Image: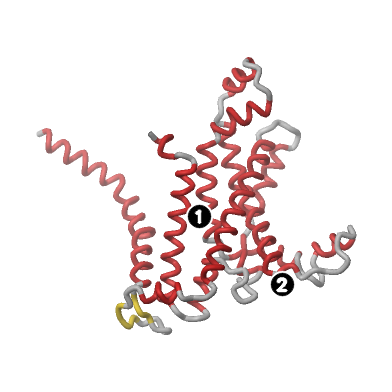
């Protein structure tokens, strides 16, 4: 009788979590399996499977002359955008948490870059950086910072910096609101106790606010790492990864392998490497924050 009750309980649980498990298997697990399978196959330009390739696609990928530079640039791109976004979001979240006239309007304004299409945002910034009629050159020349227009996106290093700025611009709203939610979850009693103990604003922020913001920072940073790593529209709209592969990240490089070179096997191998890199970066970040200790 007791076992029958346990079985009925298990069936009831499965009935509730079954749809979610099915969705995860279909939307997440199956594409990953297909991606790994494609990376081990020899696939023609027309998409026909010609047989098992083993690790051949991975060896071809490792033989790509531009790959080391692209991997390094991807690391700079992800770390740079996530760190700058997090630092700016800490200040912006703190501002949005204060009481001041027009706070609601400011909060809505901060959401705009997040709500707008990333592709359109990147396109607008490309126009603003145009060397003939772009607003950025015009303003800098009016301020006498520049003597003549600069073709910002034609220089790989300058183009990368501008693309990183656009990535920060579109990432700021989400991270700021995650931090704002974290700030609003901190009880006022904690700050009252710190005030009674004589802690100043800086000491209170470092010793109380930042440690209590750790869960919010963790969530915001991990989601940002994944989003920025897989970011395609910004780079593609502004430079298409060019000139050559000079501003490519692994994501745009993977696209070029599939579409321009029509090498689906190598592109799938690059996708698997991308997937593993994201997992490694997230694990390293969790380790840096001693996530296990907090969970324990």
Graded by Cα atoms within 10 Å as few (under 14), some (14 to 19) or many (20 or more), the crowding at tag 1 reads some
107 versus 26 height, above or below: above
Callout 1: helix, strand or loop? Answer: helix
Q: Quadrant of the C terminus?
A: top left
Where residue 244 appears, as percent x and y from the top left, is: 61, 76
Q: How many marks?
A: 2
233 versus 197 height, above or below: below
Where residue 50 appears, as percent x and y from the top left, is: 32, 83
Q: Nearer the viewer, residue 276 or 116?
A: 276
The residue sitting at 59% across, 51% down in the picture is 82
The residue sitting at 66% across, 58% down in the picture is 166
Q: Earlier in the sequence, mark 2 or mark 1?
A: 2
37 versus 293 height, above or below: below
Callout 2: helix, strand or loop? Answer: helix
C-alpha gap between disc 2 and disc 1: 27 Å
Mark 2, residue position: 154
Asked whether, in this view, residue 18 is left or right of residue 232, the answer is left
Where residue 232 appears, as percent x and y from the top left, is: 56, 65
Q: Quadrant of residue 189?
A: top right
Q: Quadrant of the N terminus?
A: top left
Where residue 175 appears, as percent x and y from the top left, is: 59, 45
Mark 1, residue position: 226
Graded by Cα atoms within 10 Å as few (under 14), some (14 to 19) or many (20 or more), the crowding at tag 2 reads few
């Amino acid at each position: 009788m007791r076992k029958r009750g346990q079985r009925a309980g298990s069936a009831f649980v499965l009935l509730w979590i079954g749809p979610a498990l099915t969705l995860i298997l279909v939307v997440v697990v199956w594409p990953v399996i297909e991606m790994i399978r494609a990376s081990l196959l020899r696939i023609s330009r027309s998409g026909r499977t010609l047989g098992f390739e083993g690790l051949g696609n991975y060896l071809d990928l490792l033989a790509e002359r531009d790959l080391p530079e692209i991997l390094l640039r991807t690391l700079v791109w992800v770390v740079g955008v996530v760190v700058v976004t997090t630092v700016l979001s800490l200040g912006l979240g703190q501002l949005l948490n204060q009481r001041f006239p027009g706070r609601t309007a400011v909060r809505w304004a901060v959401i705009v870059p997040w709500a707008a299409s990333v592709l359109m945002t990147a396109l607008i910034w490309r126009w603003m950086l145009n060397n003939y009629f772009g607003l950025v050159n015009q303003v800098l020349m009016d301020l006498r910072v520049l003597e003549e227009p600069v073709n910002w996106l034609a220089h790989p290093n300058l183009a990368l910096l501008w693309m990183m700025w656009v990535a920060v611009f579109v990432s700021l709203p989400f991270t700021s609101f995650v931090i704002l939610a974290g700030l609003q979850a901190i009880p006022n009693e904690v700050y009252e106790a710190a005030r009674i103990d004589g802690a100043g604003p800086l000491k209170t922020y470092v010793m109380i606010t930042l440690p209590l913001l750790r869960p919010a920072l963790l969530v915001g940073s991990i989601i940002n790492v994944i989003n920025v790593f897989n970011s395609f529209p910004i780079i593609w709209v502004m430079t298409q990864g060019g000139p050559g592969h000079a501003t490519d990240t692994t994501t745009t490089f993977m696209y070029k392998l599939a579409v321009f070179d029509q090498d689906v096997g190598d592109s799938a191998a690059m996708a698997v490497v991308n997937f593993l890199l994201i997992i490694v970066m997230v694990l390293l970040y969790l380790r840096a924050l001693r996530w296990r200790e907090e969970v324990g």
